[in-house]
Amino acid sequence: MAALAQSSGVSDRSDGNIRIRVARKVFPAVGARVDQVVLRDVAFEVEPRSFLVMTGPSGCGKSTLLNIIAGLDRDFDGDIDLGPGRDRLTYIFQSPRLLPWRTVEENIALALPDGDPRHGKIAEMLDRVGLSPSANAYPERLSLGMQRRVALARGFILEPAILLMDEPFVSLDDPTAHSLRQLLMDLWRQHPTTVIFVTHDRAEAVQLGTRILRLAPGQASVIQDVRVELSPAERADKSAVAAEQARIFQPA
Amino acid sequence: MAPVLTQISSIPRVSNASSGWSKTLERLGWTLGSLLAFVALWHVTAIVLQNKYLPTPVAVFDVLLREAASGDLWHHIGATLARVAVAFVVSMFIGSAIGLALGTFRRADRFFDTWLILFLNLPALVTITLCYIWFGLSEAAAVTAVALNKIPNVAVNMREGARSLSRDLAEMAAVYKFGWWKTLRHVTLPQLAPFFAGSARSGLALVWKIVLVVEAFGRSSGVGYRLNIAFQEFDVTTILAYALGFIIIVQIIEFTILQPLQARVNAWRR
Ligand SMILES: Nc1ncnc2c1ncn2[C@@H]1O[C@H](COP(=O)(O)OP(=O)(O)O)[C@@H](O)[C@H]1O
Ligand SMILES: [Mg+2]
């Protein structure tokens, strides 16, 4: 993996790429548990407006890596350069993380600065994620799937330059997940954004990503970094997705 | 009078408007029925025993009305209420500040935890007598004594609240650039509200009782003072009349201020 870290470390700094280099991330010992090295030598760059999907087995450190990229976790060896979009980063967490004491609409509105013109777009966004009837409901009265859609609406309304997403469609029923993936693709094509998307669903990875990074279990490091060679039309075609999935995830 | 108080305050809180009027009426019916039964039992016992230290409810109501008409009742209850209000606000404020600080800063908590336990276990009578001895028989000493009894309670409660603040939501607020004011108002305070409401309710119950003791010891107004005089005259009727008046006022405050407040704070819950 050192080779990969080097090869991605040489490009010049004016390309607007996001540069991620985590030499080591350790969770310190708690009680009987010893120090746990979660990430080691994870280094890659993300080109502007690309859709990078990270996959890897559960517990390999994907959420930890996103937390580091988002700047929530600064306790690691390495450095993160988010490039010009650093101030317009949005993170859609693995759990919805809504404020239970604020309505759906208020939860979305709170993500926008006061007096922002985008407040006028909340209704439209609610409509796109199919939540107009629940605009005034409190999140705990909604199903998990609906809460996830609120979280997506809250992230999308900001029209971010960098969008981090941590398994946002997990535990949704198929039609909902499908329509939300479609929504994400539409939004991404309308507002080309740099996306770093985490999932362990390989079909989803192939369908959405322009590039896939596979992380190894254990002390996660990058084991594969491939481009997804699918046109937008092919992405809607199940068999094309399956063929590309077979190509990318072939047994070593 | 104790059974009446428990009966009324143990009514489950209603936060859901859809549970409807019929339920409210039914509850009211039970409360009223049990109250009437209590008064009837008291009356019969008083008639049978014919003891001057157990007056009938009718006699007690008479005294209550007489004291109300003369203005004495309002004077004393007003003085007590004022002390309760000041002591309550002061102890909620200081107790919250201490509790939040301890819940946030591990070191401070480790160090001051012992002090907190010390003050929690200090008998009310000790703080009251010491305050009067050290600061004189003044209003300030009285209120300080009450607040000192209540502050450790509030602090423990609010410390629990601060410890339970969600890290997930704090991270969310950071990513979505809430800033400190939005975070405080929409993320932090709503999480602390149940702890605050809890300490407010239990706090008021405690403050009421301690204020009476403080008044009996070293004030010349208030329900506690009046009860102490009546005690010296073995005037049970007046004692019961004031106790009754007091309970009614406390319950009115509970129903018109505290419960609606709590219902509002909890409106978002499932
Ligand atoms: N705050 C933490 N403290 C200690 N260990 C943690 C913490 N967060 C995650 N871990 C551990 O780090 C590893 C990676 O976790 P995570 O990044 O959530 O994995 P993934 O998102 O890939 O499923 C897991 O073994 C997990 O137990
Ligand atoms: Mg995860």
Image: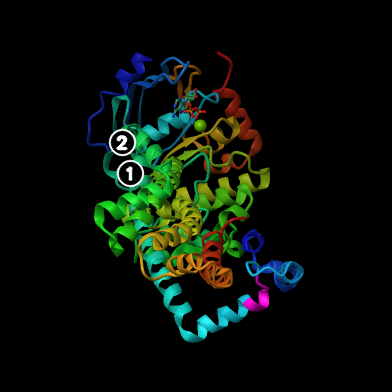
Relative side of A222 to B63, left or right: left
For this orientation, the residue located farthest to the bottom is B69
* Amino acid beneath label 1: Ala
Circle 1 is placed at which residue position?
B101
Q: Is residue B96 visible?
A: no
Q: Is residue B94 visible?
A: yes
**Marks 1 & 2, CB-CB < 8 Å contact:** yes
Q: B52 or A125: which is nearer to us? A: B52
Query: Residue drawn 29% across and 47% down?
Result: A87
Circle 2 is placed at which residue position?
B108
Q: In the rendered view of the protein, which quadrant contains the C terminus of chain B?
A: bottom right
Relative side of B253 to A163, left or right: right
* Amino acid beneath label 2: Ala
Q: Residues within 10 Å of mark 1 (few under 14, many from 20)?
A: some
Q: What chain letter is assigned to the residue under label 1?
A: B
The chief SS type of the magenta part is helix
Q: B154 or A71: which is nearer to us? A: B154
Of label 1 and label 2, which has the lower sequence position?
A: 1
Query: Residue drawn 54% across and 83% down?
Result: B66
Q: Is residue B65 above or below residue B239?
A: below
Q: Is residue B153 above or below residue B111?
A: below
Q: Secondary structure at mark 2?
A: helix
Residue A163: x %, y % from top left: 41, 43
Residue A216: x %, y % from top left: 49, 18
